Amino acid sequence: MLPTPSLLGAPTRLYLPRASLVACVRGTMVRSTVGLDLSDEQRFSHFPATPLCSVGWMFEGDGELLARSAPASLASPRRPYESRLMFSGPQTAPSITWSPGPAAGMMLMLMPDALQNLTGLDVGAWVDRVADLREALPADWVAMAETVLTLPDDASRLACLEDFIEPRWQAVRPRLPLQAQRYQDWAQSMALRAATSSVGRSLRQVERRIKQWAGQPMRELRGFGRSERAFFMALAEAEEGRRPRWAEVAEASGYADQSHLCRETRRVTGFAPDELMRRLARDEGFWAYRLWQ
């Protein structure tokens, strides 16, 4: 069985959204290392490439973002967060952060097409960007985020942000039902909505519409779906005490072969499949991956 989300006992939680928001909010991750005596190496956090947008809060401490493709090393170049309220667009490569001391924060993960409906944000302009929230989202979202920053606990913070999002989402949600429990389902649902839109239904128009909504083309979104499916299949095998059979995982997940799986896993996570599984079991910095097991 794989370990609990934090190997060192740091409070780390994944909150799934209320039922009315499942096609809009993917989840909210919360983590605190306050009160823990961590080494410098244990203060790195690894995140995979993702089609999601996110809003981040730093309640205590500070965070720094390593340069793109830089290894988890104190020698790697990095820059401090610009604000305690940060926004991240879809990321086409894995990312790593580092905290110089104890820290506590929260990350709200939003489906990119839903965020565009909610705010009018040009998601494509935010691919591979991380910046102060005030540069990206409207004033009412900034005010909500600032309020969340002042609240004392997870329950009140989650209630505040979900109560804010829900009426706005109900007002703009597409008529076609959307599925967002898995990237693959979400991408297929969005493709169906794009194909049945009353404004142009040619293949080129559908592809253009998907890229406008999600910030990335359909082939990239399908790649995230394959990667996620392979990840959960590998976790299921590991939980049963077996080493994942990568050739079978590749075939079942829609890859051309095992080499294709390995290439995409490196692109999304920065690691080969076996190395990723070892890191999940031993490295504190992979807590965000373990939350989804």
Image (tube, rainbow, N blue to C red):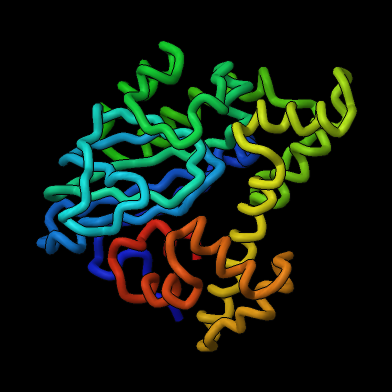
Label tally = 0
In this view, the residue in front, 16 or 215, is: 215
Residue drawn at x 35%, y 46% is 68
Rendered view: 239 above or below 80: below
The answer to whether residue 127 is above or below residue 286 is: above
Q: Position of residue 288 (x, y in %)?
A: 39, 56
Q: Quadrant of residue 74?
A: bottom left
* Relative vertical location of residue 287 with respect to residue 240 in this rendering, above or below: above
Left or right of residue 218, residue 279 in this image: left
Q: In the image shown, does 50 or 264 lie closer to the viewer? A: 264
Q: Position of residue 85 (x, y in %)?
A: 31, 28
Q: Residue at x 57, y 82 (%)?
A: 244
Residue at 58 percent across and 21 percent down: it is: 118
Residue lying furthest bottom: 242
Q: Is residue 10 left or right of residue 216?
A: left
Q: Horizontal and vertical percent for residue 196?
A: 88, 29
When the figure is inspected, residue 214 is found, relative to residue 182, above or below; the finding is: above
Identify the image quadrant of the N terminus: bottom left
The spot of residue 241 in percent (x, y) is 51, 88
Which residue does the image show at 30% across and 44% down from the upper left?
Answer: 67
210 sits to left or right of 146: right
